[in-house]
């Protein structure tokens, strides 16, 4: 006896044929609802596995506040960029009260809590 098929009800039911199609549709919905992050983070480390995890929220000034932790076993060099602009990101370390590079290196289990500003604001 198999499971019954899902049926459309009050919410949206999106049927896909692959994990990749599911990923693309989910990202499209996030973009459509304007909920995609304004920050792009590129990570380089000594492994092929992403070691850092991050969360981003807006503060009352409209700037992005970024929390990053390196959960990997090696140092991770990050490149923090603002999406949809050619302006450089200005990063302010909220824990130490200083401006830092937009390309920081985090040791394993190191935490970074920063405000990311657009140089054009």
Image (tube, grey):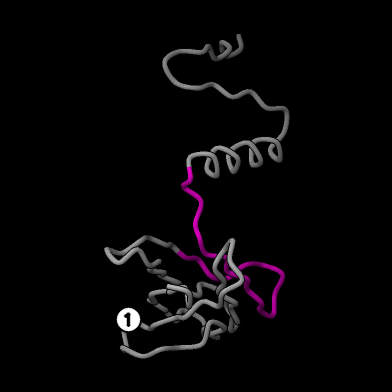
Q: Is residue 81 left or right of residue 54?
A: right
Q: Quadrant of residue 74?
A: bottom right
Outermost residue, front side? 120
Q: Is residue 17 magenta?
A: no
Q: Quadrant of the C terminus?
A: bottom left
Q: Secondary structure at mark 1?
A: loop
Q: Is residue 94 left or right of residue 102?
A: left
Rendering quarter of residue 44? bottom right
Q: In this image, 25 relative to 116: left or right? A: right
Q: Residue furthest left?
A: 60
Figure quadrant of residue 117: bottom left
The residue labelled by disc 1 is 94
Q: Residue at x 59, y 24 (%)?
A: 14
**Image coordinates for residue 53, horizontal then vertical, percent:** 50, 66
Q: Residue at x 59, y 43 (%)?
A: 27
Please state the extent of the stretch shown in magenta in the rendering.
34-54
Q: Nearer the viewer, residue 55 or 98?
A: 98
Residue positioned 51% across, 72% down in the render: 71
Percent across and percent down for residue 2 are 61, 12
Residue 37 included in the magenta stretch of the image = yes
Compared to 96, does 111 lie above or below?
above
């Amino acid at each position: 006896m198999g499971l019954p098929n899902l049926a459309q009800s009050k919410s949206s039911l999106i049927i896909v044929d692959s994990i990749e199609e599911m990923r693309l549709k989910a990202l499209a919905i996030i973009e459509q609802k304007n909920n995609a992050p304004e920050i792009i983070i590129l990570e380089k480390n000594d492994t092929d596995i992403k070691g850092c995890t991050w969360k981003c929220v807006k503060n009352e000034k409209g700037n992005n506040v970024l929390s990053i932790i390196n959960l990997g076993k090696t140092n991770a060099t990050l490149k923090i960029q603002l999406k949809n602009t050619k302006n450089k990101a200005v990063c302010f370390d909220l824990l130490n009260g200083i401006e830092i590079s937009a390309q920081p290196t985090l040791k394993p289990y190191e935490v970074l809590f920063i405000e990311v500003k657009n140089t054009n604001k």
